[in-house]
Amino acid sequence: MENIRSKMTSRGVESLDDQELLSLLIEDEQLAEMLLATYGGSLARMTREPEARLRMVGGMGLRRARNLLLAAELGRRVAAEGAGESDSIATSDDVVRLFRPQLERLTHEECWVVYLTSSNRIIERQRVSQGGVTGTVVDHRLIAKRALELLATRLILIHNHPSGSPEASAQDRALTERIAKAAALFDIRLLDHVIIARGGGDFSFREAGLIG
């Protein structure tokens, strides 16, 4: 452990590899090596584990498991804050970067809309509904009304799938069509509908050719 601490002191925390960083966080080099091996070298997979399961891996215990999850949550909040500072959107990847930190770990569905100018500058991000594990109700009339209030000319729809599958359901397709038609009545364009799945996947209606 002293070698790792010395490395951090002389070269900075950014010089540490995943195992070294984890070793300092949980104060056990052998346990850190075992944890990474258990989760295929993925810190993301490890920190998506429930506390009750994580504390049992290698006898890590409650305190270490909680410290690890606290560090992961801090990282997610920093990422979300950084993404929120973006003032424009160019691609579906930009949408995923903007919303994954806040949506990926939710156990319920949320639907958000990003209202944009004609140059894709963000005017407002708004949560328009919050539901259960398998669905949420979205009122397309309220979305169109808010776009008019903001003088937005474009919008993007985003929601999450707690199930882990990013594939668009029949309900997702129907919702997209309703919102696109409602927006078009006021010369407002639905640019994309992006689904962010728990576990890392995502789906873009535009990239799939489902939005013209």
Image (cartoon, rainbow, N blue to C red):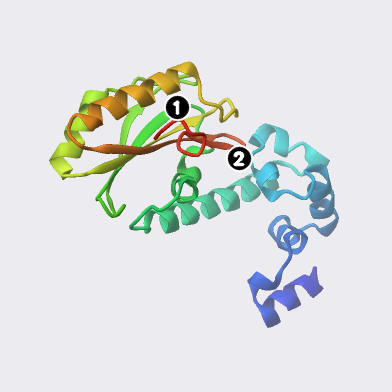
Q: Is residue 67 left or right of residue 104?
A: right
The spot of residue 190 in percent (x, y) is 32, 36
* Residue at 46% across, 33% down: 205
State the quadrant of the N terminus: bottom right
Q: Is residue 15 left or right of residue 173?
A: right
- The relative height of residue 107 versus residue 79 in the rendered view (above or below) is above
Amino acid type, residue under disc 1 in the picture? Glu
- The relative height of residue 100 versus residue 21 in the rendered view (above or below) is above
Q: How many labels sit on residues?
A: 2
Q: Nearer the viewer, residue 206 or 59?
A: 206
* Residue at 46% across, 45% down: 92
The spot of residue 202 in percent (x, y) is 55, 37
Judging by the rendered image, the residue that carries numbered circle 2 is 200
The spot of residue 73 in percent (x, y) is 54, 48
- The relative height of residue 187 versus residue 83 in the rendered view (above or below) is above
| Disc 2/disc 1 C-alpha distance (Å) | 15 Å
The spot of residue 133 in percent (x, y) is 50, 21
Residue projecting furthest to the bottom: 10
First reached walking from the N terminus: tag 2 or tag 1: 1
State the quadrant of the C terminus: top left
Label 2's element? loop
Amino acid type, residue under disc 2 in the picture? Gly
Label 1's element? loop
Judging by the rendered image, the residue that carries numbered circle 1 is 109
* Residue at 72% across, 55% down: 26
Say which mark, if any, is on residue 33. Answer: none
